[in-house]
Image: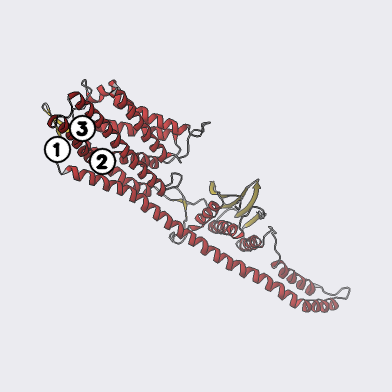
Amino acid sequence: MKAILYVFLDVTIYVVQGLLLVMLLKAAQARFPFKKLYTNHAILLIQYVAMQMILHYSNMVKSILYGNRMIMNNSRQSIIPVLVSMLITFAVSMLLLKEERLKIVYYVVTFYSVIELLKFACNPIFLWIFEKRMGLNQYLCVDKQMYGEKMFYAAASVVEIIWNLLFNFTILFFAYKIIKRIKKYLEMKEAYQKSELIFLLFPSVIGLLLCLMIRSMMFWVDGNDMQLLLNNRPEMNFLIPCTSLLCIIMIILAAKMLRKLIDESNKKIEVSVYQDRIKEMEQHIGEIENLYAGIRGMKHDMKNYIADMDALMNEASGKHSDQTALKQYLDSLQTSVEQLDMKYNTGNPVTDVIIQRYVQLTKKNHIDFQADFIFPSDMNIEAFDLSIIINNALDNALEACKRQKEGNKTIELNAYRRENMFFIVIKNSFDGTFARNRIDGRLRTTKPDFGNHGLGLRNIEVCAEKYYGKAETTIRDKEFELAVMLQKRVEL
């Protein structure tokens, strides 16, 4: 009966531990599109429980790990099941989840490190409690003779079972709290750089290595006697829990520090976006003022234009007279009017002005520019958010075309809608030269002063994320394409 109870207890503990592992990896993208949403989680959980049961209950595995006696001769052998379980969990996670390897390594190692550290943090305290309870049982039976031998063994079994329950569920409770705290600071779906993941991984690896080192020294067999580290080195009853708790704190603080750094970085990007907005608003206001100033000037000078044309027509009234002066005057007047003409009518004055500005800039730099853009007025997308996307994208395209020394220089701006989705696609020719970040593979600026440049694409991504969208870049030979997807925003 006692053996069955312990098997049930172990299965329960392994199931709860497996659920904590799934909790850490829950937000990861699944590699296989199973019909049931939680199939991947169920496979991961079943794998973990099955592996723990095999490692601790299979006689064949025990004989392989510990020899014919199928029991540990020293605590060093207890390292093998931990490492085997961790490696298999990592392999299954890699198979099921479509995430960066280093990210999965961090979460798996952190899970095993937290469980192991909590065991060693709680073990000396609970061993002391266990010895006191067993000592009390012996005192009542032997010294006070309040009950007999049968009752003594029954009481000892009850104390042992209760102790195991309290010890294991205390570990599970604090493991849940720690994992919940880590999840609060870190999101599985976030894109982390390798340097950030390595920063997170260090405390977890240190904690796991510490636990493996302690496991190798916990007990050993000297002849027919078993020597215990905590008995031979009483100071370890204090040092091991303190060191384990410090490692746990380091794991949590690493996640908290990274969260703070990411938030500060995002704030800097937001400040950059708002600064760009202010700059673009000033440009828009200036361009609109110039436009209306030109219109007012044309209106003011219209009487003079009419008088001048009347005089030129009178001079050219003869049948064979020279009308060259009149034609030149009309051509210059037409050029002045064309400068005030808005070639593209997008449905919004902000995007009208932006596109018109790039019409003039591309014409000045001998770049073929084409635009097919209609403002999505009923999708609750702010005009200035679109202005950031279009300005940054066209500015990057213009810079790329300026660096192009041969071939046709072209820029295309297209936009279209599919139900509640709005797509902006900018294509431009370039010289085929581009650079990627070595850490995360993202495109980066080729300008020498990269510290003050290269925020254009990030600003576009921030605006896209505001509308639950994204920005993707594609390079084909010497053509660069930026596709931005936005979703209709529903106001609550």
Relative placement, left or right, of 65 versus 473 is left
Return the residue at label 1.
231
Q: Is residue 313 above or below residue 231?
A: below
The residue depicted at 30 percent of the width and 43 percent of the height is: 205
Return the residue at label 2.
122
Relative placement, left or right, of 481 versus 291 is left
Color scheme of the displayed model: secondary structure
Q: Secondary structure at mark 3?
A: helix
Counting from the top left corner in percent of width and height, residue 118 is at 28, 41
- Give the residue type that dot 2 points to: Cys
Q: CA distance from mark 3 to mark 1?
A: 15 Å
Viewer-side residue, 219 vs 68: 219
Q: Secondary structure at mark 1?
A: helix
Counting from the top left corner in percent of width and height, residue 426 is at 59, 52
Mark 3 neighbour density, 10 Å: few (under 14) some (14–19) many (20 or more): some
Residue 41 visible in the shown view: yes
The residue depicted at 66 percent of the width and 62 percent of the height is: 349
Counting from the top left corner in percent of width and height, residue 250 is at 30, 49
Image disc number at residue 75: 3
Q: Earlier in the sequence, mark 3 or mark 1?
A: 3
- Give the residue type that dot 3 points to: Ser
Q: Earlier in the sequence, mark 1 or mark 2?
A: 2
